[in-house]
Image: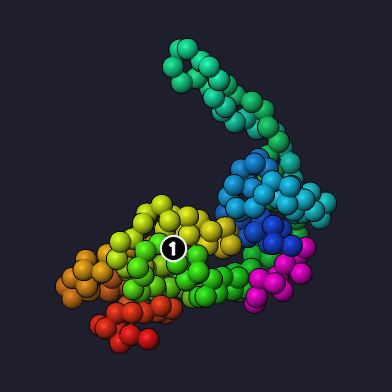
Amino acid sequence: MSDVILEKLFGGEATVKVLRLFLFNENLALTQEEIASKVHTNFEWTKNAIDYLEKLGFFKKRSGFRDFPIKNCKKGHKTVKKRMALWLVNPNFPMTDALRQFFHRANIVSPKEVISKLSSTGNLKLITISGMFLEDNEARLDLLVVGDNLKKASFDKGVGAIEALLGREIRYATFETPEFLYRYGMYDRLVRDVFDYKHEKILNKLAVFGEN
């Protein structure tokens, strides 16, 4: 299901991201700032989404503590605990399981989006999706990326953007091309566990697989 349809159904991109975050990560209790950071959405949009979901009864609010650094502290790194408002899923909300199943089946991240989010990573040669992208809970990896001159900071940023859309952490592996070809030729267990089972090559520039 396209993300545009989901946004129309649930009141906007921020609401969809917040829903997925809490539906796929049980027992979360986060501040508004923490939620905004995890879903990669500005604070105001996130606040509106939280308010909307709280009015629906999906969220409940409780207080908790967070550590904050003391500015200009002369005795080393010191923190102070502050009481904050935290949001968590209301255990009495009747539609939680149904929503979780619905979002599990709704493919919010297309292969094109995955490629786009990782495009600045380096000279990409192969992107393979498996695991959660293909509804295979037994897979060891969700994402395998091969390329030259891969930039860790850019890759981490791209993965973070995908995770914000999915609401879940991605299990992934990255390889420079020579290392990957060596591992593939040596029947490396991790690599074979991807290619011997359900997977999809969404970008392929490697002759070993027949370039497309």
Q: Residues within 10 Å of mark 1 (few under 14, many from 20)?
A: some
Q: Nearer the viewer, residue 138 or 150?
A: 150
Image height of 91 relative to 100, above or below: above
Range of magenta residues: 1-11
Q: Nearer the viewer, residue 145 or 107?
A: 145
- In the drawing, does residue 167 fall left or right of residue 147? right
At x 41% / y 67%, what residue is drawn?
A: 143
Question: Can see residue 99?
Answer: yes
Residue 23, x across and y down, in percent: 63, 58
Residue 95, x across and y down, in percent: 74, 62
The secondary structure type at the circle numbered 1 is: loop
At x 58% / y 50%, what residue is drawn?
A: 38
Image height of 85 relative to 74, above or below: below
Question: Can see residue 169?
Answer: no
Pick the quarter of the image with the C terminus. Answer: bottom left
Residue denoted by label 1: 120
At x 54% / y 71%, what residue is drawn?
A: 113
Extreme residue in the right direction: 55
- Does residue 122 show up magenta in the picture? no
Image height of 33 relative to 209, above or below: above
Residue 144, x across and y down, in percent: 37, 68
Extreme residue in the top direction: 74
